[in-house]
Image (cartoon, rainbow, N blue to C red):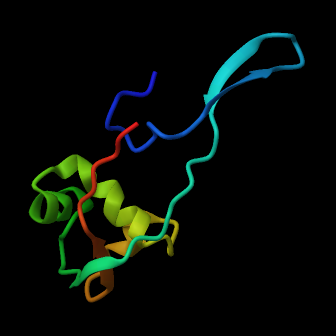
Amino acid sequence: MVFKGSRYSATEIVELTGPDGRVARTLTLRVIVPEASALEHTVSDGERLDTLANRFYGEATRYWLILDANPDPLNPFELLEPGRPIHVPRNRLVAR
């Protein structure tokens, strides 16, 4: 179940049948639409995605907005290298 307001709320749920005949429900891939940066932030030593999200959005659980705006690198820890500039998009509500 995907709750209302989740970043997955607009993602389609599909049913797949396995080779053994069992049916599993799963989500299709979530399409990430590029967002324009609201600002660029230079990472300082010791910063974390949840604390950055709390600072910029007032909610630590919205760290995924920063991840979506910075798709390279794939490892989120590389994104937090001190001195690295990262894009911080506007806060947006996800609705179904």
Picture quadrant where residue 82 is located: bottom left
Instruction: Identify which residue is drawn at 25% across, 67% down.
Output: 90
**Looking at the figure, which quarter contains the C terminus?**
top left
Q: Nearer the viewer, residue 17 or 45?
A: 17
Residue 32 vertical placement versus 89 (above, below): above
Residue lying farthest to the front in this orientation: 96
Q: Nearer the viewer, residue 95 or 60?
A: 95
Instruction: Identify which residue is drawn at 27% across, 73% down.
Output: 88
Instruction: Identify which residue is drawn at 19% across, 60% down.
Output: 53
Residue 59 vertical placement versus 74 (above, below): above
Task: Give coordinates of residue 89: x percent, y percent.
Answer: 29, 70
Instruction: Identify which residue is drawn at 86% across, 10% down.
Output: 21
Whether residue 56 sits left or right of residue 86 in the image: it is left
Q: How many badges with numbers are in the image?
A: 0
Residue 84 vertical placement versus 61 (above, below): below
Picture quadrant where residue 80 is located: bottom left
Whether residue 38 sits left or right of residue 21 in the image: it is left
Task: Give coordinates of residue 68: x percent, y percent.
Answer: 42, 63
Residue lying farthest to the right in this orientation: 19
Q: Nearer the viewer, residue 8 or 48?
A: 8
Picture quadrant where residue 7 is located: top left
Task: Give coordinates of residue 24: x percent, y percent.
Answer: 69, 18
Whether residue 53 sits left or right of residue 18 in the image: it is left
